Amino acid sequence: MTTTRTRTRFAPSPTGFIHLGNIRSALYPWAFARSTGGDFILRIEDTDLERSTQAAVDVIIEGMAWLGLDHDEGPFYQMQRMDRYKAVLADMQAQGLVYPCYMSVAELDALRERQMAAKEKPRYDGTWRPEPGKTLPPVPDGVQPVLRFKNPVGGVVAWDDKVKGRIEIRNDELDDLVIARPDGTPTYNFCVVVDDIDMAITHVIRGDDHVNNTPRQINIFRALGKEPPVYAHLPTVLNEQGEKMSKRNGAKPVTQYRDEGYLPDAMVNYLARLGWSHGDDEIFSRAQFLEWFDLDHLGRSAAQFDEAKLRWVNAQHLKAMADDQLAPLVAAQLAQRGITADARLPAICGLFKDRCDTTVALAGWAAAFYAPVTIAEADRAQHLTDAVRPAIASLAERLAGLSAWDKPSIAAAIKEVLSQHGLKMPALAMPVRVLVMGTPQTPSLDAVLALFSPETVQERLRNA
Ligand code: GLU
């Protein structure tokens, strides 16, 4: 048996900032290529000149790089392939696979109105389609024709969709598609087919908003003497309100999740589950995902985005991540706040990551080690009472006398102060945390203090 090398593609239109719903259509073909040892191709479908922007292309490329969805070929830009499309068109024209249609917009409108009035589906009526023995109308003067594809008459177009199962469309339902505009520029469905052929795509994994295009594309494939690829049409991603996720109703650009402190592997994990499953596994690594991914377990119904769930998945990955891998990401967040971190950062990450769901939250904790803290009035009033001040002063004194600045020595000093003043741990620890970290809730005090310099601790304790 010969097996063809898998080739998949992601073919976004850069007409808006790419959001999580779109990027999932990159994740699956990428994962399928990686898990089958094939190639993943990036193709930018930028033929809608009015709506395409470079900024949107940048977000696609940046977002994919951030998520680690690396491509083997491309990015190819459709606008740079116009000559190729035109050459294929000319070829098709020479073979009689397409024909010029001179019907004006006004005539088309009138046709549509008649059909609607007769309760028929609006469709092109084949006026200019050449047939043996048929006389075509006289070519009007000064009209640039469109080119229409000669759709097969009779029979069905069918495919076994990896998500939706078998789909069959009767050819009578498809009219002759315009594949070149009067100025000769090719239209969308045609470019996609030429690209998928030229790029030798074996599996088209895309959003199900393209299901209606598929039978037309399959007919064009066959007219060009090629067999169509395998199709998998992914159900829509809904936002939290149950609407189709889109920029218009508040979807964020993918890169915003990076800025909000999400980890690429957590995003991959979350997006993977948004329309695909591996038993009940909720948390998995990138490597496990690639080992498990297949097209047989894609979900058939729309998936709904849930930010709380995403945060939870992120928190699980954050906890599991090695401190020295986490530190550079937190350092980047700190840099946003104008803070330069140092060698203590991995240990700080280790101490605080369990209580954080994003690297932004973690940077919030880490900041206390690098910049002065603000103490809320309410905390000051509640925790920094006259009753505890003498104990704080004793602690400062004992800490100043330590010969080693480490967790056990600090723990011993705290213990001595507690017994000297007859206090329970929280009575001393809460006010000291407020002074040093700006909040009464932190991991164990000795561990926290050990990560500060003795000088900073002295300085902050003097604020009592
Ligand atoms: N450019 C299309 C889109 O962004 C995708 C086309 C395809 O995957 O075939 O929706």
Image (cartoon, rainbow, N blue to C red):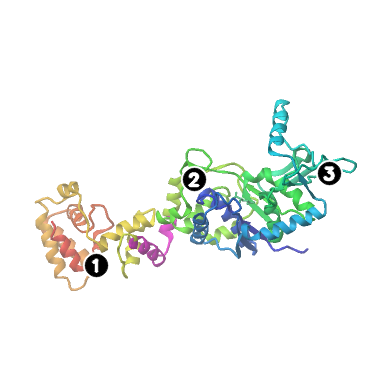
Residue at 71% in and 34% down: 122
The stretch in magenta equals 316-335
- Judge by depth and name the residue closer to the eye, 328 or 422: 328
- Vertical placement of residue 70 versus 163, above or below: below
Residue at 18% in and 68% down: 455
Disc ID at residue 247: 2
Residue at 61% in and 53% down: 47
- Judge by depth and name the residue closer to the eye, 109 or 210: 109
Asked whether the viewer can see residue 121, the reply is: no
First reached walking from the N terminus: tag 3 or tag 1: 3
- With 411 as the anchor, is 233 left or right in this view? right
Q: Are marks 3 and 1 in contact (CB under 8 Å)?
A: no
Q: Which residue is mark 1?
A: 408
**Magenta stretch holds residue 329:** yes
Mark 3 residue element: loop
| Main secondary-structure element of the magenta-colored stretch | helix
> Residue 438, position in %: x, y?
22, 55
Cα–Cα gap, marks 2 and 3: 44 Å
Q: Which residue is mark 3?
A: 130
Asked whether the viewer can see residue 61, the reply is: yes
**Magenta stretch holds residue 37:** no
- With 210 as the anchor, is 62 left or right in this view? left
- With 81 as the anchor, is 461 left or right in this view? left
First reached walking from the N terminus: tag 1 or tag 2: 2
